Image (cartoon, rainbow, N blue to C red):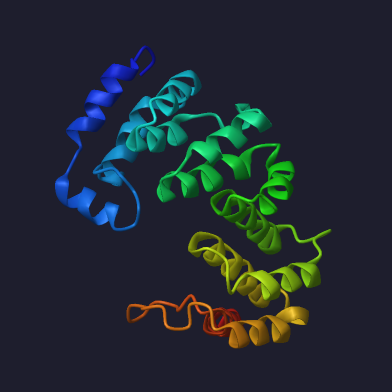
């Protein structure tokens, strides 16, 4: 739907506002009340509109930014542009979608991974670790896995929540995907006990790295 204005889209997003959805989202730090299935339906109708996506992002509205991520052209962003966007994206859902739907598909993702992983802002650093986890799983050639385990062992226990979660995911991914490092990954997880007591619903896999690694390896072996 070319020719759609920002004002029209914002009005449509405002109409999705649901106080119950907002209440649930706010418990996770996300300040919007839009049903994401309905938001995705709007994105599907609008299709790719990169300039509109830029304009929606600039509004600062969380729902508008989520929609922008869905209708942008990921490869069209410059490195510095994505760096600024990550630093502006304070809502966890926006951060997650920006990394997974945009940065991972952008030609500058490796440069950003290296820069962000060592960033003093724990939210930005968490994004760097998320990109590292992706490489651990899909393209580990050239990664220093023992070095990553050293960093995790030294820093994860005292890291802020979001960064700790990202480092823990990387620890689990190393243990799941790389049998030669599995024993050490399990040992680090057991010693640090990060997320050991995290409430996990029945039928779900615990984020505690030793439990997570063990379960995923079991599933791989059962195939």
Quarter occupied by residue 139:
bottom right
Quarter occupied by residue 172:
bottom right
Decide: is 44 above or below 206.
above
Q: In which quadrant will I find the C terminus?
A: bottom right
Of residues 183 and 81, the one nearer the viewer is 81
Of residues 1 and 23, the one nearer the viewer is 23
x then y, percent, for residue 26: 28, 52
Decide: is 25 above or below 215.
above
Q: In which quadrant will I find the N terminus?
A: top left
x then y, percent, for residue 97: 47, 45
x then y, percent, for residue 24: 24, 56
Decide: is 162 above or below 213.
above
Judged from this view, the residue extending furthest toward the right is: 142
Give the residue drawn at x 61%, y 26%.
76
Give the residue drawn at x 49%, y 29%.
72
Number of marks in the rendered image:
0
Give the residue drawn at x 30%, y 38%.
39
Decide: is 195 above or below 49.
below
Quarter occupied by residue 107:
top right
Residue 108 in view (yes/no): yes
Give the residue drawn at x 19%, y 39%.
17
Is residue 19 rendered to the left or right of residue 162?
Answer: left
Residue 174 in view (yes/no): no
Of residues 31 and 214, the one nearer the viewer is 31
x then y, percent, for residue 60: 39, 30
């Amino acid at each position: 739907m070319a020719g759609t204005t920002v004002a029209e889209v914002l009005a449509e997003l405002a109409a999705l506002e649901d106080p119950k959805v907002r209440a649930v989202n706010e418990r996770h730090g996300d300040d919007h009340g839009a049903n994401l299935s309905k938001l995705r339906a709007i994105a599907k109708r609008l299709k790719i509109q990169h300039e509109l996506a830029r304009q929606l992002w600039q509004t600062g509205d969380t729902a508008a930014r989520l929609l922008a991520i869905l209708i942008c052209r990921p490869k069209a962003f410059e490195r510095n542009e994505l760096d600024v966007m990550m630093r502006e994206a304070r809502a966890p859902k926006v951060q997650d979608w920006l990394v997974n739907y945009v940065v991972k598909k952008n030609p500058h993702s490796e440069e950003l991974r290296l820069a962000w992983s060592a960033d003093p802002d724990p939210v930005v650093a968490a994004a760097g670790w998320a990109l590292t986890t992706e490489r651990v799983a899909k393209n580990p050639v050239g990664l220093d896995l023992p070095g990553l385990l050293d960093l995790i062992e030294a820093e994860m226990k005292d890291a802020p929540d979001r960064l700790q979660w990202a480092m823990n995911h990387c620890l689990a991914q190393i243990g799941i995907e790389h049998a030669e490092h599995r024993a050490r990954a399990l040992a680090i997880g057991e010693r640090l006990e990060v997320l050991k007591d995290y409430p996990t619903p029945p039928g779900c896999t615990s984020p505690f790295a030793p439990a997570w690694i063990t379960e995923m390896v079991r599933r791989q072996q059962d195939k």
